[in-house]
Image (spheres, coloured by chain):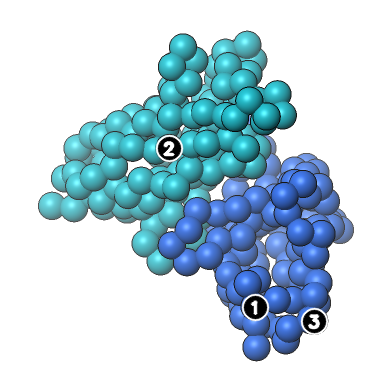
Chain colours: A cyan, B blue
Amino acid sequence: EVQLVESGGGLVKPGGSLRLSCAVSASTLTDGFTFTDAWMSWARQAPGKGLEWVGRIKSKTDGGTTYYAAPVKGRFTISRDDSKNMLYLQMNSLKTEDTAVYYCTTDPATDWGQGTLVTVSS
Amino acid sequence: QSALTQPASVSGSPGQSITISCTGTSSDVGYYDHVSWFQQHPGRAPKLLIYDVTKRPSRVSNRFSGSKSGNTASLTISGLQAEDEADYYCSSYARSDTYVFGPGTKVSVL
């Protein structure tokens, strides 16, 4: 099983920025999981609402390409540091509707982190 | 607004079987065999139950099964148990390398 731990959430004003981090690790018994080869995603869930896919990043060997959901395209950026087994979500020009618990997931979403809450409010 | 549609709620008695539908379009569910199902208990992170329409991770009970016909995918829970009371979400790969989620279905065990 892969362990994912998100951090960096908090309260931010509309128009502000925040960077979320996700530390990824795996037990030695996990079936061949290596972060370097993994595609990763972010999803979010507004309070009392359903899940929403945010975006994904391919492995560097597969081009490292990123893809985003329409509501966040142009404002959010996903990146990765394979040397540290870290995934990031840079969020700029935040809006109140971005308030949600943000989850880091493997792609496909076999494993999820516990989530980190982002609150956008004045 | 979700690109996929699910019933808001489904209920059943212990031991019964229930089915949750997930309807998309020919651009997502109907085109790709990459439909997943997730279970989420209150205050917890989602858990993958089914991926690629019918595949089940080894740690998931075989009481959960998935299928697809045309633009509609389905999750069946057999031998319903009290612990199955949760929210269930479908997800599908869509064009332009994106994913879409359904709005979720609340399962109640009577």
Q: Is residue B74 visible?
A: no
Which amino acid type is marked by label 1? Ala
Q: Check residue B82 in the rendering and tell me which mark sits there, or answer none.
A: 1
Looking at the figure, which quarter contains the C terminus of chain B? bottom right
Which amino acid type is marked by label 2? Val
User: What residue is shown with label 3?
Assistant: B16
Picture coordinates of residue B20, whole percent (x, y): 72, 69
A86 above or below B78? above
Q: CA distance from mark 2 to mark 3?
A: 37 Å
| Secondary structure at numbered mark 1 | helix
B22 above or below B53? below
Q: Are the residues flagged by discs 2 and 1 in contact, CB closer than 8 Å?
A: no
Q: Are the residues flagged by discs 2 and 3 in contact, CB closer than 8 Å?
A: no
User: What residue is shown with label 2?
Assistant: A5
Q: Residues within 10 Å of mark 1 (few under 14, many from 20)?
A: few
Query: Residue furthest toward the front?
Result: A28
* Same chain, labels 3 and 1: yes
In depth, the one of A103 and A66 nearer the eye is A103
Disc 3 sits on a residue from what chain?
Answer: B
Q: Are the residues flagged by discs 3 and 1 in contact, CB closer than 8 Å?
A: no
A46 above or below A22? below
Sooner in the amino-acid sequence: mark 3 or mark 1? 3
Which amino acid type is marked by label 3? Gln
Figure label count: 3
Picture coordinates of residue A90, whole percent (x, y): 34, 29
* Same chain, labels 2 and 1: no
Disc 2 sits on a residue from what chain?
Answer: A
In depth, the one of A51 and A73 nearer the eye is A51
Q: Residue at x 62, y 21 (%)?
A: A34
